[in-house]
Image (cartoon, helix red, strand yellow):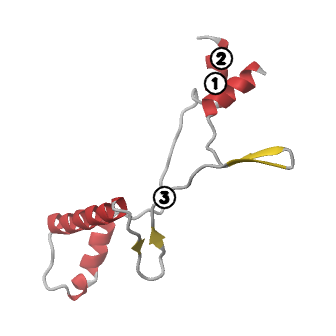
Amino acid sequence: MDNWENFRREVLRLNEGRTHKITNSLGVYDSYKWIRKHKWLNIGRPLTEHEFYSIVRKINNYLADELVKGNDITLPCNMGRLEIRKNTPKVSLENGRVKTDLPIDWDRTLKLWYED
């Protein structure tokens, strides 16, 4: 391996192990247990796990389709809104300095740091 690759691996910390731990997260099964505990909130009859998962999956697919079509989704209880936006990147010169909102190309940036 050449020096550039070693430098890149060191800066990006690719040699170290990564541990990710998700905490305080609720899933579909947790919501199933909650709704079962609260006597199904008068929906009529108890649902099986399979039926509950099927309903959640269909709702998620519907929401995804609406987002793909470009529609906004307003969530209940003032929880916010889901929307997809597109912005055009801009590059300008202000007070002799370049201002931009372009994303950073990390490979080229690291290569510049290595060579400089």
Q: Residue furthest right?
A: 95
Inspect the image, locate mark 3, and give the three-letter code of the amino acid beneath it: Thr
Q: Count residues near mark 1 (Cα–Cα under 10 Å), then give few for <14, some for 14-19, many for 20+.
A: some
List x then y, in percent, for residue 15: 58, 26
**Label 2 is placed on what type of residue?**
Trp
Q: Residue furthest top?
A: 2
User: Could you say which is closer to the camera, residue 93 or residue 74?
Assistant: 93
Residue drawn at x 42%, y 75% as measured from the top left: 74
Circle 2 residue: 4
The residue singled out by tag 3 in the image is: 23
Residue at x 49% of width, y 50% of height: 21
* Quarter of the image that includes the C terminus: top right
Hey, which quadrant is residue 26 in on the image?
A: bottom left
Look at the numbered discs 3 and 2 and tell me whether their residues touch, using CB distance below 8 Å.
no
6 displayed left or right of 75: right
Q: In the rendered image, which residue does mark 1 sit on?
A: 8
Considering only vertical position in the picture, is 24 above or below 33? above
Which one is nearer the viewer's eye here, 46 or 51? 51
What residue is shown at x 65% (from left), y 49% (from top)? Answer: 90
Residue type (three-letter) at the residue carrying disc 1: Arg
* Marks 3 and 2, the one that precedes in the sequence: 2
Q: Could you give the CA–CA distance between mark 1 and mark 2, rounded to whole angstroms?
A: 6 Å
Q: x and y percent of residue 45 in the render?
A: 13, 82
